[in-house]
Image: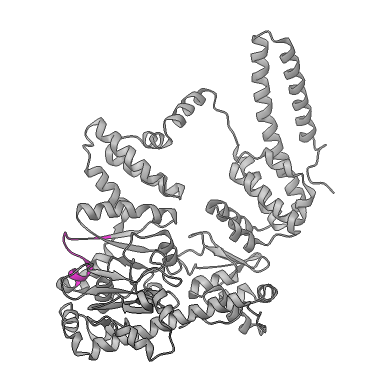
Amino acid sequence: MQESTTQFIPEEKIREIRETSSIVDVISDYIGLKKVGINHKGLCPFHNEKTPSFYVNESKRFFHCFGCGVSGDIFAFLMKHDNLSFAEAARLLAKRYGIHLPEKPLNSLERQRLSERESFFSINEAVAQLYHRLLLNDPRAGRARAYLAQRGLGAEVMEDFCIGFAPDSWDTVVQHLKSTPHSAPLAAKLGLIVSKSGGQYYDRFRNRILFPIWNASRNIIGFGGRIIDQGEPKYLNSPESVVYNKRQNLYGLQSAGQHIQKEGAAIIVEGYLDVLTLHQAGIKNTVAALGTALTEHQIQLLKRYTGDIITVFDADPAGEKAMARSMEPFLNNGISPRVIVLPKGEDPDSFVRTQGGAAFREKIAGAGFLLDFVIERIIARHDIASPRGKVAVCDETVALLKQVTDPMERDLYEQKIARRIGVSHSQIRSRGAGPAARKAAVQAAPQRQESATGSAKHAEILILKILIAHPDFIGRIEENIFDSFTQPDLRQLGLFITSAFRQAGALDIPQLVESIQDQPMQRLLAQASFFENPPGDPAKALDDCLRTVRLQKLAGEKKRVGMLLKQAEAARDEAASVDYQHKYVQLVEEQKQITKGAVHFLQG
């Protein structure tokens, strides 16, 4: 499917689609929703769950899953669920609601870029078909056909993946282009042919089996070529181009995507033949990185399909190092991958050809979490009977766990490691805090103050929920009220939503969630958006919460000033003593006024 030169959708039409569409009606086409108060609730379609944690709010035009954390507007739902681009999701909704989408004219540069991009896809498609015909019919492809037959690949998988052959010739593609409308300079930009002096060209791929590489939109963007005879390099890939970036694409995704969604899991292997062999064995939810270590962009691409990703490694030192290196991009994206460890010297292709697809399926069923495996490898390298060995394990594992974004998951792993090597959980946690933090914790321990009572923290959360549910209250509070918050993340979110409201005069929750880069804060805003008003007057509830927060702040200030007053008196500093006494009296008087209700924080 080629990308179209269809013009961009005007912003006012996007707004009309968003305001006209019913997010509840659209999502109800995919999952069952039950009305619960002002929200709708159902089983999340993006992860497996038995208890509904997926919420949809019609008035905010927003959804959020309290289980897996996915959230967004109606466009985001369709893009994630059906693997659509934004434009495709917009057109689908426009058609459903009878909204006409006029075309916005492109400027000359935009037209040129889109036209050239389409030409690139068209050239790649034409050359892929040429290579495929040569593999099937050309006498020069005899050794290539024999090699593929030896690897057990049948006609169906070769057809599905358009496997081809480049003869040992310098001008097969060059001559073919002359009989087509495609230009040699554009083919050279793709790396299919290489320019030489005198305006001449020669073929890049010669005497190789060719593996076309598609993007997620099923456009051919490049090729991988394996040498038939002896020679270097064994694999020669297309150079990066306007349409091909090996760090942003995955081999086989154009075919595997639907199977990944169906199976609920994706398998990542290393090479083209691994993918082809597994697909032929019926394990079609398989993709491969394109000759590089797995990147965050590739993981994010897979997250559009599933959160359950299974990696495959060899059981040798190189495989173990690769496992450890792969953890960071996964954990940075909130993914805890599973792992299949194959016997030494085996890869998925050889394993399936010798042991069969059923044996590989058993490996899939038994796949444990990669983080567990890496931690066990760390422990195995050290003598945990000795203090030095325990310290070494602590240092290596806490460095790894710092990348785990979920606090509960990190805490559970700390407990597991502590039990495994015979130390306390607090020792693991202290080790992860670092020397400076440990020293500060020891110094602060005798004078630790309760920074926030349960009631104060609850009040801070409730303030944010009420302000999101009733944005008109934002104009009636002082912005510096958030200085009294004891929780930094809640303070930051409070300042963010009040600033957004004062700039726009409204709160567009889907837009705000999308604009936040910090994932914990993004999730906090999404969760706070699904708030059921408690019985009674929300204005009074907000004022009471603001009162609680301010009193908590005053209590802390009183304690601090009281300590400073004692220090000044002990030092016989009369001027400082008088100053602190005056401040203390002011704080006591303000506390009395707030306590008896003489002060109101919600104005108007």
Figure quadrant of residue 354: bottom left
Q: Nearer the viewer, residue 591 or 268?
A: 268
On the image, the x and y values in percent for residue 598 come to 83, 36
User: Which color mode does the image show?
Assistant: one colour
Q: Is residue 352 left or right of residue 240?
A: left
**Can the viewer see residue 410 in this picture?**
yes
Determine the residue positioned at 58% across, 82% down.
6
Q: Residue furthest top?
A: 572
In the depicted view, which residue is nearer to us: 423 or 172?
Answer: 172
Rendered location of residue 257, percent (x, y)? 40, 74
Q: Decide: is 419 above or below 144.
A: above
Q: Left or right: where does residue 293 sit relative to residue 121?
A: left
The residue at 81%/38% (across/down) is 599
User: Where on the picture, by quarter, is residue 564?
Assistant: top right
Count of numbered labels shown in the rendering: 0
Judging depth in this view, the residue of 290 and 379 nearest the camera is: 290
Question: Can you say whether 170 is above or below 536 in the image?
Answer: below
Question: Does the magenta segment cover residue 399?
Answer: no
Give the position of the N terminus as an image quadrant: bottom left
Percent of width and height locating residue 151:
18, 77
Image position of 8 with respect to 180: above or below: above
What stretch of residues is rendered in magenta?
A: 340-352
Q: Which residue lies most toward the front here?
A: 198
Q: Looking at this view, name the residue that lies furthest to the right.
A: 604
Rendered residue at 19%/72% (across/down): 352
The answer, for residue 534, to whether it is visible in the render is: no
Please indicate whether residue 414 sits to the left or right of residue 456 in the image: left
Residue 64 appears left or right of 578: left
Can you give x and y, in whole percent of width and height, for residue 412 in the image? Answer: 39, 46
Residue depicted at 54% across the width and 24% down the height: 447
